Amino acid sequence: MPKLLVIVESPAKAKTIKKFLGKDFDIRASVGHVRDLPTKGLGVDIQNNFKPEYVTIRGKEKIIKELRDAARTADRVLLATDPDREGEAIAWHVASQLDKNGKTIARVLFHEITPQAVQTAIQQSRPIDMMKVNAQQARRVMDRIVGYQVSPFLWKTLAGGLSAGRVQSVALRLISEREEEIIRFVAEEYWTVTARVKGAQGEPFEVRLVRTGDEKTHIPDEKTARALVDDIRPRPFVVDTVKTKEMQRHPQPPFITSTLQQDAARRLRFTTQKTMMVAQQLYEGLELGPEGSIGLITYMRTDSTRVADEAVDSARTYIAQEYGADFVPPKPRRFKTKEGAQDAHEAIRPTSAFRTPQDVKTYLTPDQFRLYELVWRRFVASQMKSAVFDVTTVDVNAGPHVFRATGSTPRFAGFLTVYGETADEDGENEENGLLPPLAEGERLALKDLVPKQHFTQPPPRYTEATLVKELEARRIGRPSTYAQIISTLRMRKYVTIKRGRFSPSDLGNAVNHILVAAFPNLFDVEFTARMEDELDRIETGDLDWVGTLTAFYQPFNERLQEVNAQRSSLKQSLTEMTDETCEKCGKPLITRWGRNGRFLACSGYPGCRNTRPLETGDPEVQQTHEQCDKCGTPMVVKKGRFGTFLACSAYPTCQRTRPVSLGIACPETGCGGYLTRRRSQRGRTFYGCSKYPTCKFVVWDTPVAVACPSCTSPIMVEKTDKPGAAGLQCPRCHHRMPHPHPPTEHPEHATSEPQPV
């Protein structure tokens, strides 16, 4: 009979830990949260010190019963949920559902899933940290109050089904304000002058004009540039100075959550959500053949660059053995953790530096391997010597005009042997080319002299990497929440993504406009950062969580009452008059907002309820080769309140509409219809036949025009397995196979619409 029950969150983690512990241990999984605020209603008794009204999560009744039964037969219970605020709260909720009967219920923290780490953690059990629980409760209650009281305000002001989040809305504000900066930006012209010259040795190289006399070069227009070129061309080019100095480039610290998300986005093109999902798999443990199941990295939700001494020693030993003693610095590197970090966990690192990516590659999926390799290389490089370069700067005189060129020569690769650097998101950090041997006073031959026009550029739109960096720099949310923030913005269609960069959608701009106008303080960057600090201070015991919520709620509630009385004027600020008239009553049409964006509506509402999709004016998108089956007129793609559809171009004379085709024929024999994307009454996307209700074929997963190799089905549907790999499944015989062209994002997050046939 088991004497000790260990409860973790994940079945995968339970499977790994079970192999480390003996027969006296029973390992069970809570499968995440078991209790939470109710899905309907506020679930917070504001008048009773913000008491949360927790309920058992639907479907978790069986798991709770199994945990209770296991706890009754155990002498001791250890709660080993994730080592963070969320995990502490889950442990507290699980403990509240167990029958204690005088037995000890303690908390253990697994920072890494290895035999030694697990055994050590079990010996260092402690009580549940109620300060962490209260910090998590405060965040949960605050977010619930904002979400459940501001979202209805959005529904009544803008459109139903929208959501507002305390942190998500601030991230949307950053994206919207960056777009406004870009729109307001006025490009300024400037010119540069570059000379191509050649010395006595080596190949020609380029030098750029940097100053004339003591004045820094500024060339505003072509006339000035041409005058400079005419003045410079006849002059001799003579080397004035050649300066060479040593430059060191130091390795970066091992990953924390935010930097892992940034580098995975830049180097691997992973979304933040994918990064955290794969990192969770690496942390919880994977089967490694003879070695068994073991965790490959330490806990991946951390803001500390601290590393355990034994891990540092192991890395230094590996570096000396693999690369030589010359690559090991005299002293171990210690990295300073940023101010304000919780410093509860180590940095993200491999559980063993000697477990190289190539050693485990055959046991990992491609995504798992790539992320593990990234973590391993970053950590090993962080304990290597700095890279050394010789940087040469050459100034060349052409009369009073000074040209300059800079080149670098690597002397010692150091950490770059393991973790080479890449250009950043906007093309910076590019390496300079080599320069030929040059001597001061040497005359150079002028090969070419080129003036070139440039324009100043607006600030770039955010990528996932740069948005995460901005959120972290401004202390908006916690790194562990960034993936959910970005995922929510995409799912709600508040943003669009083009070439990997975020732009606010029309809907996102409207939501941001309303929220900032109505709650300028609540969705202010500095206010949000200050609230994060207060949540941290609750965890350390410096603030009381009920008092913090009281101080937050009183001004929030007062402002909510004020803006509810101003809904009409706020809604009016988004309404625009048009030159079009209503074909039913002749009154002017106005633009209004719905869940799927703007549409035209009669200004005579509610007397006249006529509406019409708002034309985009893009004929390449609108036109199709379809013909109306009623009048024979070409059909066009229009966007209405419930998405895109095909409509007769002879509207309003002919009002025939049809769903947009996915380009896949209905698989039902003799049907003759085609598959379309549809939405259920609860807002969930599904796919059905265009001939509904005559044909009732329907699937919930995205259909693909790939024939099943096991039966006669002409289509399969996309499925994602537990490790996150994309695959296909037959809707008839359920045969599974790998996806020949895996999707780059979840279908519900796709930014493009189905195309008409």
Image (cartoon, rainbow, N blue to C red):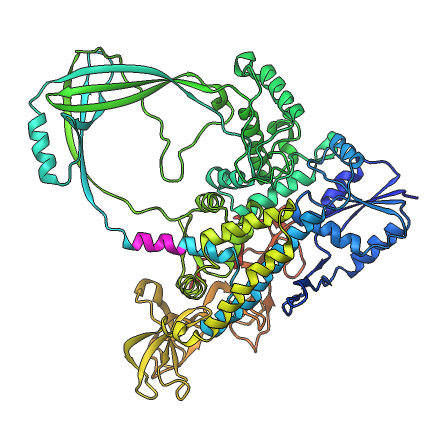
On the picture, is 384 further left or further right than 625?
right
**Residue drawn at the location 39% of the way across and 83% of the way down:** 610
**Residue drawn at the location 69% of the way across and 40% of the way down:** 284
Image quadrant in which the N terminus is located: top right
The residue closer to the viewer here, 337 or 15, is 337
Residue 1 sits above or below residue 417 on the image: below
Rendered location of residue 180, percent (x, y): 33, 56
Magenta extent: 176-183
Residue 754 sits above or below residue 82 on the image: below
On the picture, is 255 further left or further right than 464?
right
Residue 521 sits above or below residue 322 on the image: below
On the picture, is 205 further left or further right than 676?
left
Q: Decide if residue 607 is in sight here.
A: yes
The residue closer to the viewer here, 250 or 54, is 54
Image quadrant in which the C terminus is located: bottom left
The residue closer to the viewer here, 437 or 86, is 86
Q: Decide if residue 725 is in sight here.
A: no
In the image, is residue 34 part of the stretch drawn in magenta? no
**Residue drawn at the location 44% of the way across and 66% of the way down:** 518
Rendered location of residue 338, percent (x, y): 52, 36
- Give the number of marks: 0
**Residue drawn at the location 60% of the way across and 29% of the way down:** 357
On the picture, is 246 further left or further right than 215?
right
| Magenta segment main secondary structure | helix
Rendered location of residue 201, percent (x, y): 23, 12
The residue closer to the viewer here, 22 or 475, is 475
Rendered location of residue 726, percent (x, y): 58, 49
